[in-house]
Image (tube, rainbow, N blue to C red):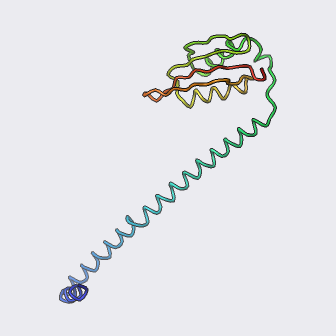
Amino acid sequence: MIARLSAWYLGLTLRERVLVSLAAALAALVLLVYGIVLPVGHGLDNAAERHDEVVQRSGHLMAALDQLAAPAPKASAATSGPVDQLVAASAQAAGFVLQSNQAQGDDAALVSIIGAPPRAALGWLDDLGAEGLSIEALTVTPSPEGTVSLNATIRRAGQ
């Protein structure tokens, strides 16, 4: 096979050999770039993105562990009063409309939110901890539109 290819190549004129060699070099260059360099580059980029995501998740986990080790915040004047009113004010400030907000004494409330963006809703629930409230029970249900419905029992922290 190689002998036949070599004989064919030697049978070409000088001009044809130059053009065939140039075409082979261009084909090899295209194969090198699209077959090796770009896939390896994309793989390295994807690995770097995954590494950044893992580092961020690790940072969030470490911050959450630090918060768990810290003493619980004490109720201030801003967190005094019935929990259902505190939750309603916080939800309104965050831009959520509560579907239901049922007081369970002065220290707990059962709330329901429908059609909230997931990151915003879970971020709001996380922010309640800074207000001296804690989530006792939580049910999150995704919807096909990309939003979530959530039901939560929220209690004053330390109660």
Residue 149 screen position, x and y as percent: 52, 23
Picture layout, residue 117 above or below residue 112: below
Residue at the image point whose x is 54% and y is 51% from the top: 49
30 horizontally vs 89: left or right: left
Residue 30 screen position, x and y as percent: 34, 68
Location of residue 66 by image quarter:
top right
> In what quadrant of the picture does the C terminus appear?
top right
Residue 137 screen position, x and y as percent: 64, 24
Residue 131 screen position, x and y as percent: 73, 23
> In what quadrant of the picture does the N terminus appear?
bottom left
71 horizontally vs 129: left or right: right
Residue at the image point whose x is 55% and y is 19% from the top: 113
Q: Nearer the viewer, residue 86 or 155?
A: 155
Location of residue 35 by image quarter:
bottom left
Q: Nearer the viewer, residue 69 or 45?
A: 69
Please count the marks in the image.
0
Residue at the image point whose x is 43% and y is 61% from the top: 39
Residue at the image point whose x is 29% and y is 76% from the top: 24
71 horizontally vs 154: left or right: right
